Image (spheres, rainbow, N blue to C red):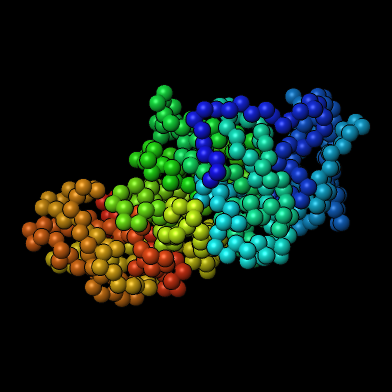
Amino acid sequence: MAKSLCVVLILVASIHDCEGALRFASYYGDHMVLQKSPESAVLWGYGPEGAQVTVTLSGTSRQKTSLVDVTKGIWRVTLDPVEAGGPYNVTAAAQSSTATLTDVLFGDIWLCGGQSNMWLQISKIFNASEELRLAAKYPHVRTFMAALNLSETEQTDLLEVELPWSVPPENVAEFSAVCWLFGRYLYETLQYPIGLVESCWGGTPVEVWSSSRALKQCELLQTYRSPHMNSVLWNAMIHPLLNMTIKGAIWYQGEANVHYHQDQYNCSFPAMIDDWRMAFHQGSGGQTALDFPFGFVQLSTSEKGSKSDGFPNIRWHQTADNGFVPNRRMQKTFMAVALDLPDATSPFGTIHPRDKQDVAYRLTLGARAVAYNEKDVSFQGPFPTLILSAHDFINITYDQTVSVTPSKDIFEICCAGIQTPCGLESSWVPAPIMHWGPTTVQLSTSLCQPTDKVAALRYAWQDWPCDFKACSIYSASRILPAPPFITNHSPGKGNQEL
């Protein structure tokens, strides 16, 4: 990303001048999408103190009016639930002044957050010209982007807007590819309006997107030597959005935590999700669900041949050390596995793969299953339910039918004379795939010394475990890759026995 997070906070002047003038808050505008029924959309803005504001929703079929008072310079209305569709006009009137939003649709609002892989624009991905040509066919998928700003205190409204609500293809080229493609794929299934709100910043750790409440749960208090200021983007780029009723959120972040509080990410990431859910629920007056669906991208790849376990550790921690989601700690979440989508020739660096179509499609499968309760949508790759170790082989039983490609080294075992926890410095050796069946894989343990025992097993536990779409274990359709796992951390979806 062109701009990276600075340590020094910059004082940014608020755009909310003309004190007392009747207007909507910064992230309401022409062409926007408001959250449809069964939830109710929240509208708010600024006005003369003590004035009465009449808010009118008018369209071809019906008209609704609400009357509210301006208190401390702010008015706020919760509309009655409105079914998907439009367009509508929304007018706020007080005394002799009015403010109007035109071409407003009702649908589902998805918030898109994270760092540079979420920020990476449509214009920079594979087949960009084709994606931009297609964008005009989706006028009901609307986009909005918050500007990059930091704040030491929680802001009521965005300090700036980068891209106002727009009708495709306007501004799509500069919009998040993952966010846009996710919304477009969702629209193809749902066939009603989708509103996409992008609020992300490259190079940022989870701590800057988290409130002090969430960070305290993980004992991540600000220290003098900390290179990142806790909560500055929560304050400036998330907290202002809390009044908005949303359907859910998607997230692509974690690279920055490979070298910053890596060991705490299994706490900090789930804690951030919990806190966002509570805060959006309260901020919207209970309209945003307290358990709104939260999807995320498990880290892709960065450095081919790397011996570091930073990326594998963060991938594991993204699941609260379970290896899969949803799980008991991270309910109503969904994950797009991306470790099989490397891009060795990316002009934006290998940490920024250009295939965002597969990432977004895998996220969409998760949303359809978790957020929209589609019963026959597969969204999880294979995961072990039983691991049994014999003298010279290991049998793995998966939770679904698998498609297997032989590999000599994508599985690894830790050989130890005594059964102790295995780490990076332990003796990990390849465990070649010997045989497989519809739901089973058998591995050789012959590379262990005869006097050693298999103390642990791991799969795809490398920064760059395979070439493009060429990992060893996929779903039967080969659409969904198996996520990485390590038995040292008790994957927890069944009985592990080594």
Residue appearing at x 34%, y 72% in the figure: 404
Is 469 in front, or is 23?
Answer: 469
Q: Quadrant of the C terminus?
A: bottom left
Q: How many marks?
A: 0
Q: Nearer the viewer, residue 136 or 211?
A: 136
On the image, which quarter does residue 476 sit in?
bottom left
Residue reaching furthest to the right = 96
- Vertical comparison of 422 with 211: above or below: below
Residue 283 placement (x, y as % from top left): 63, 37
> Seen in the image, is 422 located left or right of residue 247?
left
Location of residue 395 in the rendering, given as x and y in whole percent from the top left corner: 24, 67
Task: Estimate the x, y position of residue 321 in percent, counting from the top left.
Answer: 36, 49
- Residue drawn 16% across the image and 56% down it: 415
The residue at 66%/55% (across/down) is 172
Residue at coordinates 49% horizontally, 52% vertically from top-left? 348
Q: Quarter-wise, where is residue 471 in the image?
A: bottom left
Asked whether the viewer can see residue 88, the reply is: yes
Q: Residue furthest left?
A: 451
Residue 266 position, x and y percent, is 39, 43
Decide if residue 58 is on the left or right side of residue 315. Answer: right
In the image, taking residue 238 as reference, residue 17 lies left or right, namely right
Relative to 76, residue 89 above or below? below
Is residue 70 shown to the viewer in this render?
A: no
